[in-house]
Amino acid sequence: MSAPGYEMGARAVLKELLTYKSGALGLGIVMFLLALSFYTVITIPYGRAIALWRGEGGIWLDKPRNAMPIWAKYILGRNLPENIVMDTREKGVGIVKAITPIPGTNFKKLHVEFTFRYPYDGFPSELNLFFNAKYEEAAPLLYIYWVKPEGEEIKLLDYVLRAPDDTLYLSINPEAYKNALKHVVASVGEPETEIPIEVCLFGVEDESILSTETAKPLKGVYKLVIRGTLFGEASDIDVKMVIYGRVWGLAGTDHLRRDLLIALLWGTPVAIAFGLSASLTISAIQLIIATISGYYGGKVDALVQRLTEIYMIIPFLPFLILLATFYKLTIWIILAVVIILSIFGGGIKSTRALVMQIKEYPYIEAAKAYGASDKRIIFLYIIPKILPPRVPGLIGAIPGYVFLEAGLSFLGLGDPYLPTWGKVINDAYSNGALYKGYYYWVLEPSFMLILTALAFAFLGFALDKIVNPRLREM
């Protein structure tokens, strides 16, 4: 014996779902998000994602800070600067490294030359030099020069390595800035306002360079030349030059130079797993509790209804915020807490009302007369009957839990390790992204949240039309 009523196979439901525009659109977006989730988990395992987000090993040091996505240059219609990276360990075009022993001594002459073309419409954001040296006696003595397209050679500074793996931050080095500015003053005159070293090195040397508002980048072939002396026969040195751009990657970077694509990708499986797990688990538990309550009635029903009423007056979000404030919660502990706080939710009362109607149906009376147990009646006759109307609500509840996790992360109360959409928005807010014009930092995770919400909302709306004939389109 089985429960009569509205029955459709999965294939029939899918076929009818695709007849609705909202259903087809919602299903398409959900499938895309699921495919993206599987791709992310396979290509960027959890451990690697955490290591990347933490920046372990200085992996982001050669990436620009607060760089827009690379596609922004096409929207803005400007050829914004991209990263230029040249390393003597990679024998590429424009890279020269020569070490010549000095006869009669254990000294060596060093000559490193990076030649590159700069075709961009803006100025770079930073200039850094990364050294990797081997020496036993004194540290190498270096002389660093900048050569502009017209051939002017600017001596930036004399430099002695502080460690074998030293980094020279040219953009904030006072001596380098002083010498670059001196060249501008000698060529054009005293600037109206303070201009950064990037303007001094890459700017057109006319009156426009005297102000950051009018300065124009000089396109052409540049050189960075390093001459120096190495001490010791076994001494050696490699140099990596990084000229940081204004755009990078498909999603841009944040204030810690991290690729935001990592968080956007990993935010997808986290959001969907959290939303689906919470919605499915809570809906299943509430369905069982409501069915037992409505079927047995009496003291069991009274107890369930009193618990439901108590749960309904508990301030859910403030309680969760309070708990997350005192304890560092992982994503799965947050999920468990959400489930516990939602077990006796308002959905029990609406489901209970359906159960109390269905248990009076003739086929339930026939099942009892046939000798079917209460357990069999509940799980084989009543629940299958009330399950279809619950599915649209289950699907429609997913965005709420996705936004809940994002909201906790935005408040700084989410999982401290996982890169999620809410965490990205929190970082953007904390660092004044909108005030500084880094709109992409906020818009990208917000778009993913909205896309997820719309996908499940469309899908739930279409399913509601299928299981509820009164809502079907004529």
Image: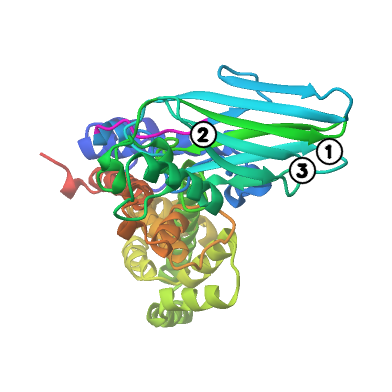
Name the residue at the left extreme: 474
Determine whether, in the image, residue 455 is placed left or right of residue 151. left
Work out whether residue 319 can be spotted: yes
Q: Are marks 2 and 1 in contact (CB under 8 Å)?
A: no
Q: Quadrant of residue 291?
A: bottom left
Residue under the image location 38 percent in, 59 percent down: 403
- The x, y position of residue 301, in whole percent, is 43, 77
Main SS, magenta residues: loop
Q: Are marks 3 and 2 in contact (CB under 8 Å)?
A: no
Residue under the image location 16 percent in, 49 percent down: 470
- The answer to which of 146 and 66 lies nearer the viewer is 146
Instruction: Measure the alpha-carbon separation of dots 2 and 1.
Output: 26 Å
Work out whether residue 38 can be spotted: no
What residue would you read off at disc 3?
A: 164
Q: Which mark is residue 135?
A: 1
Residue under the image location 56 percent in, 34 percent down: 145
Instruction: Measure the alpha-carbon separation of dots 1 and 3.
Output: 8 Å
What residue would you read off at disc 2?
A: 146
Q: Earlier in the sequence, mark 3 or mark 2?
A: 2
Range of magenta residues: 77-84
- The answer to which of 188 and 54 lies nearer the viewer is 188
Q: Are marks 1 and 3 in contact (CB under 8 Å)?
A: yes
Determine whether, in the image, residue 118 is placed left or right of residue 13. right
Marks 2, 1: nearer the viewer: 2
- The x, y position of residue 131, in whole percent, is 68, 39
| Residue type beneath disc 2 | Trp
State the SS at label 2. strand
Marks 3, 2: nearer the viewer: 2
State the SS at label 1. loop
